[in-house]
Image (spheres, rainbow, N blue to C red):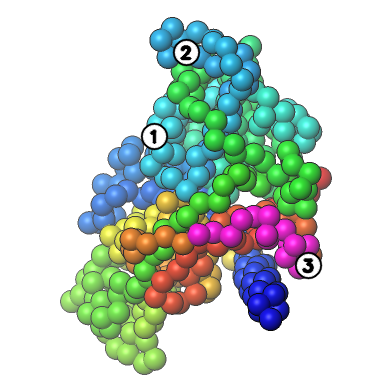
Amino acid sequence: MKQNHKRRAIELSKDVLILLLTCSALWLAARTQLLAPLDNLLGEERPETLAGQEQMGTQTGSALPMAMVVNVPEGRILTEETGLPGEGEGIRSGIVHDQQACQELFQQVAGVLVEAMSGTVTPETIDRERWEAALTEQLGVYMDFQGELPMPVLAAWLSGGSTQLQGNVRRLILAGEEDGVVLYYRNEEDGNYYRCACEMGDGKVLEQALASFTDNGVFYAFESEEYQILAPDTLLFPNTPNLEVYTVSNPVNGGEASLQELVRDLGFSLNSTNFYSTDEWVARSGDDSVRLSERGTVEYTAGDDNGVLPVIQGDGSSLYQSVETCRKVAAILMNGRCGDARLYLSAVRETQDGLEIEFDYSLNGIPICMDQGSAAHFLVSDGKIAQFTMRLRSYAASGTTSAVMPPKQALAAFSALNLEGQELMLTYTDGGGDTMSAGWAARQESGKEE
């Protein structure tokens, strides 16, 4: 009898797992990408106005990876005392689910990355085997921004400068080779891998930044026959972590009073703004309108004139200026209201209507999947923000943790749901409840598959 109960419990657990993965797959199928990080990092303090957002700390924060992996092959380990290569086996140290540790490492290598991006020669296309060798056999650091960052935007956020590199990047490797620093990356637009030898960049700085790490067993799916059904660059750990449970709330549930505060933050004059309510609260200033739902969704629509929001600097066609202006507007409404969460740039797309720019929330390096879409969606057209939708949510650590199911138990569900080739990744899912715990989700790789 006890065996029957135990068998039913196991079968029930499998059914629940399959249901959760099905929901994740359907949610991700409805969206092009989860994100993707940048990490937020629109700054730790809530900005007061749209002006004064040019501080380097804010911009560098927007380019922070959400996961990093240090790889030091055998014979390349530096001793802290002498700074010279020592003996011992190679190390592989992954930093995930720990945004503070990511930030500390990134600060050490960001200067080298800036030099590499500004001083690269023409990139050469490489095959998948060369990419895997760079991940596992070379001294370097792998960075995963989760979102898809246009190269010009990443370069401008890091240093205010420019780069000759083009395309959208989520994953890149900063490696030290005999001839200096080399940059490897995957262009998410075409799915191809590239290698750039850098005219600038100090390999010794990179080596010294990676000298103090110890191996923690992180590995990629392509390194294990057991995980071959997953996307090859899926990052895995031998031990499944216990992760924070978060409470979820609506930070703007005060009706018209909340709407007045929001439009004032956006630059509306309350003296010339009309407020009324239907099934939601509405504010109108000239031809511009802002709507606020009970759940905290803010929708802005610009009129035919220049409107209240800032126009895109320059000639209005700059990709970086478009993304940066949207980032500032998102910071105005979301920073200070999202609690422990941070924002990262998740997608930039050219459409028939204009440039679509999306931001999403993350918690300690783990992306948040929202059931209604991205955290912030902008449409830029004719040099101005034509529309935006922001979903304001506040997240706070509950002080408790929950165990995450080991990834091996998700493989059967991946196969049953025909999710082969997709990435297995940890996410928080905000379905409108009061709390949320981390769990596994499937993510389709962008670009063309090899």
| Of pointers 2 and 1, the one earlier in the residue sequence | 2
Vertical position of residue 256 compared to residue 88: above or below: below
Q: Label 2: which residue?
A: 79
The mark found on residue 104 in the picture is 1
Q: Label 3: which residue?
A: 416
Q: Amino acid at mark 3?
A: Ala
Let me know if residue 41 appears in the view: yes
**Foreground: disc 3 or disc 1:** 3
Q: Which span is picked out in magenta?
A: 403-417
Please identify the quadrant where the C terminus is shown: top right
Let me know if residue 448 appears in the view: no
Q: Position of residue 363 (x, y in %)?
A: 42, 56
Q: Position of residue 151 (x, y in %)?
A: 56, 39
Camera-nearest residue between 387 and 240: 240
- Circle 1 Cα neighbour tier, 10 Å, few/some/many (<14 / 14–19 / ≥20): few
Q: Secondary structure at mark 3?
A: helix
Alpha carbons under labels 2 and 3: distance apart = 48 Å
Residue appearing at x 56%, y 56% in the figure? 426
